[in-house]
Image (spheres, rainbow, N blue to C red):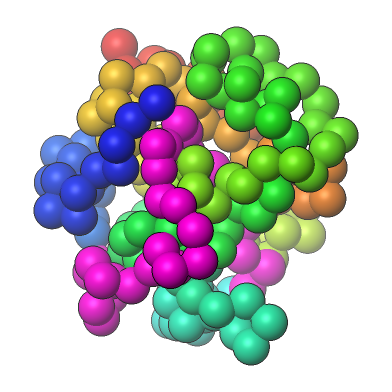
Amino acid sequence: MATPITASTLVAALKDEGLTVVEVRDWRNHHRNHQGDWGPVHGVMIHHTVTSGAERTVDLCYDGHPELPGPLCHGVITKDGKVHLVGHGRANHAGLGDDDVLNAVIAEKDLPSPNEQNTDGNSRFYGFECENLGDGEDPWPAAQLEAIEKAAAALCRHHGWKAPSVIGHKEWTDQKIDPRGFSMDDMRDRIAERLK
């Protein structure tokens, strides 16, 4: 359990991990806190966007759409490996998921298969949307995968978490398939190595 990182500390943590950070519009004050709690936070959730084009993807994640207002995450990781910060606070990214998964994340143990939608993930997870069509064919450039690793590691390092605190959206709920095209187990291995 942890108090959410401040905006300035997040920027510093990402840069300390070697990332290029782009601060988008009024991201520091852009959130959905009026819709519910933000924190305590327990982990980091990785998504794919089902979009292409960095500018379009970042704008969508900042603004959202009529059915789901933005921000749709905290950071957007584009194919070039840049992290675009689009929100700070509660974001519409995780939705409802399985409390057994949340308990496993908190305990940093192996994840059970999700089979319930009974817990609000938007209040408990940081979210990174990653520019990718999510069709299993759109490539994941090395720079982007490295940025996912570094961004997740930056938050883990700040909070004293280990790699099991990082999950994919599909590991939170059986209603989602993202991220598709790389292995979350492999990504956690990379994050664990970086945290050494």
For this rendering, which residue is in front, 71 or 23?
Answer: 71
- Residue for point 49% across, 43% down: 125
For this rendering, which residue is in front, 149 or 154?
Answer: 154
x and y percentages locating residue 177 in the rendered image = 78, 49
- Residue for point 72% across, 59% down: 134
Quarter of the image where the C terminus is located: top left
For this rendering, which residue is in front, 69 or 164?
Answer: 69
Q: Is residue 96 left or right of residue 25?
A: right
Q: Judge whether residue 17 can be spotted in this image.
A: yes
x and y percentages locating residue 77 in the rendered image = 43, 58
**Image quadrant where residue 3 sits:** top left
Q: Kindly give the residue lying farthest to the bottom in the view shown.
A: 66
Residue segment shown in magenta: 22-51
Relative vertical location of residue 173 with respect to residue 160 in this rendering, above or below: below
Relative vertical location of residue 23 with respect to residue 143 in this rendering, above or below: below
Q: Is residue 9 left or right of residue 51?
A: left
Quarter of the image where the N terminus is located: top left
Q: Is residue 25 left or right of residue 49?
A: left
x and y percentages locating residue 169 in the rendered image = 66, 45
x and y percentages locating residue 189 in the rendered image = 51, 19
Q: Judge whether residue 46 can be spotted in this image.
A: no
- Residue for point 83% across, 38% down: 116
**Image quadrant where residue 33 sits:** bottom left
- Residue 117 lies within the magenta run: no
- Residue 24 lies within the magenta run: yes
For this rendering, which residue is in front, 125 or 46?
Answer: 125
Give the total of numbered labels: 0
